[in-house]
Amino acid sequence: MHKKRFLKYIEYQKKYSSHTVNSYATDLNNFYGFCIDNEFITSEDEIISDYKIIRKWIVFLSSQKLSAKSINRKLSTLRSFYNFLLRENLIDSNPILKITRLKTEKKLPEFISDKKMELLLDSPVFSDDFEGVRNHLIIEMLYGTGMRRAELINLSVKNIDLNKQNVKVTGKRNKQRIIPFPVNLSELINKYLMLRKEINTENDFLFLTKTGKKIYPNLVYRTVNKFISFISTQKKKSPHTLRHTYATSLLNNGADINAVKELLGHANLSATQIYTHNTFEKLNRIYKQAHPRAKK
């Protein structure tokens, strides 16, 4: 890792990477420090091309109780560095290609029970002024349609069809989809639109601040976090939690997984299937509680 090459690589990352450059520098220094300490190389100027040394580093990192996720991140740094060396014609092949990423445990998406959501949405915690009704609608819209935060922020008034009770959403890669919403949401939308007129704005976006500007991501996050805190102590209380809640609720109540995929705007079924784990856990609990043989 010749100093000049290393600095050139760091400058490259500053230009083209969204990650912090410090993490790249730390990971590479960690790897080369390990190689010198174990006398696999005698100088940092050497370029390591033996994949077996990288495997030994992985074993060392595992012995230090690093998580699989952290180790995979460090391997990503090495992969990026070796690709850079390939572009510079300093090596013939990337040794990382012979390394398999460690398996990481998939975390199940956190969601809120229907009972708790009903408790929140029917409670008097939302005021009747513009901001109170808007915040109420934000929660109802996210829970009632499963749309993403960015999709909610970019909704325009014309995207809402009150007669057909659906909303047109523009998702990732500008792919549009139509999502139906419940009757009570229509009533709340009407109430909000009446108050929205008093803002006296020509802004087409549905959700506005009290000064008539388009709402922003942190406002949505703070709103969701605040009101979910009334009914739940779970760690994650974000707009995406309501998306998880929407999907889990649909599947728990018998919705077809392909239909849920379309409603969520997922590109493939594998992204939707993670929610089936939650529904399976529920069915498993019901089975253990109800079946006479499961109680033994």
Image: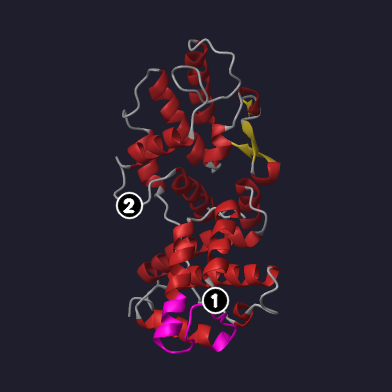
Q: Is residue 186 above or below residue 141?
A: above
Q: How many marks?
A: 2
x then y, percent, for residue 63: 36, 83
Kind of residue indicated by mark 2 = Gln
Mark number displayed over residue 101: 1
Residue 175 visible in rendering: no
Q: Observer-nearest residue: 41 or 196?
A: 41
* Horizontal and vertical percent position of residue 100: 57, 80
Mark 1 surroundings: few (<14), some (14-19) or many (≥20) residues within 10 A: some
Say which mark, if any, is on residue 162: none
Q: Quadrant of residue 295?
A: bottom left
Residue 21 spot, x, y in % from top left:
49, 57
Q: Residue at x 42, y 45 (%)?
A: 238
Q: Is residue 64 above or below residue 122?
A: below
Closer to the eye: label 2 or 1: 1
Task: Name the element at disc 1.
Answer: loop
Front residue of 8 and 26: 8
Residue 229, position in %: x, y?
Answer: 31, 42
- Residue at 47% from the left image edge and 55% from the top image edge: 20
Is 175 left or right of 290, judged from the image as shown?
right
Q: Looking at the image, can residue 250 be seen? A: yes
Badge 2 crowding class, 10 Å Cα cut-off, few under 14, some 14 to 19, many 20 or more, is few
Instruction: Give 88 or 100, whichever is nearer the viewer.
Output: 88
User: Mark 2 sits on what residue?
Assistant: 234
**From which residue to which does the magenta span run?**
31-52
Q: Is residue 39 magenta?
A: yes
Q: Secondary structure at mark 2?
A: loop
The answer to whether residue 124 is above or below residue 233 is: above
Whether 171 is among the magenta residues is no
The residue sitting at 38% across, 51% down in the picture is 236
Q: Is residue 161 left or right of residue 285?
A: right
Name the amino acid type tagged 1. Arg
